[in-house]
Image: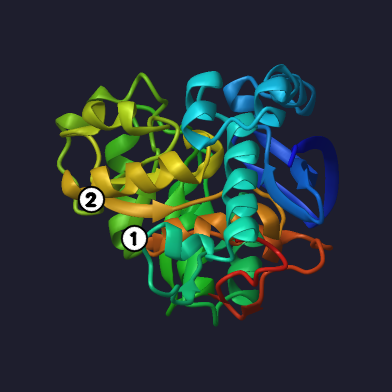
Amino acid sequence: MSVELVAAPEAFPIAGRFVISRGAKTQAVVVTATLREGMRAGRGECVPYARYGESPESVLAQIESVRAAIEAGADRAALAALLPPGAARNALDCALWDLEAKRSGVPAHESAGFAALRPLVTAYTLSVGSPEDMFAAAQKAAERPLLKIKLAGAGDPERLAAVRAGAPKARLIVDANEAWRADNLAENLAACARAGVALIEQPLPAGADEALASIARSVPICADESAHDRKSLPALKGRYDAVNIKLDKTGGLTEALAMAREASAMGLMIMAGCMVGASLAMAPAVLVGQYADFVDLDGPLLLARDREPGLVYEGSTLFPPRPELWG
């Protein structure tokens, strides 16, 4: 039976604004790929990311460039040779996983080697802002067990102190999104240590992170923008203690699972991360979360409206996807 590929952008409003060091947005724009085969359909969702030179238009063009191959029956292995890691390949790879599950009746998690999926405790992200605003946001989310704090460079020690005061019991992850520099790294690391931070994501710009190899630190450092797929892993040695694995960077679940296994074998801690997207983007990442020391799959929690049916969250606990959503 032939496969029909349909790809289209969708927009989901964010509750308020999502602000990081590189800017703010009020909606999550995603691209959804659907593979129709008779009465069956496999779906995947990706989030084009400007930091990596992506836009909805460029992602749709990439998907269109492999339409003939996909509709002729290209599988996930063939897809990996057709497209580079990135959002477009992610949408198609996850759609192929979903279609395979629908065809076979074997859940995606079983095909990936998991007898069952456990619920995950996800971080909840606080946007960067003034210390006063971040204190208020931390107070509002203080009962969540894990908070991820977006930082921006100048003034970050004050922001950290404000968040810790607002949420004294929460475990904290901080994410500088490449905003720190070698000359303020020690000061910011010390502020993280005082605040009892559990993990620091991407403090220095990718490609300019050599200072991490020589500075003493008491808080583990996690690579995000410095790591995309398995080929990125060797360069992390000596600079990073963990790696943030995101399907939109790896180019799909297939590479993400392989990357998680290889990173673990190297002794790196794993974070299962996401861009700001809807439940269909998070669902496959729940499988990566089974390997993770830290989980950051809170995209739907940041939206004013998710897709239906969506993932089920109870507070910060994320439950595995139901088949009608994905897998």
Where is the N terminus found, in terms of image quarters?
top right
- Does the rendering let one see residue 250? yes
- Looking at the image, which residue is at 43% across and 56% down? 288
Image height of 171 relative to 7, above or below: below
Residue 140 located left or right of residue 183: right
Please state which amino acid type lies under the numbered disc 1.
Tyr
Residues at marks 1 and 2 touching, judged by CB atoms closer than 8 Å: yes
| Circle 1: element type | loop
Give the label on residue 271, or none. none
The residue wearing badge 2 is 264
Q: Pick whichever, 166 or 2, lies toward us.
A: 2
Q: Is residue 197 above or below residue 152?
A: below
In this view, which residue lies farthest toward the front? Answer: 1
Give the label on residue 291, or none. Answer: 1
Lower position in the chain sequence, tag 1 or tag 2: 2
Please name the amino acid that badge 2 sits on: Ser
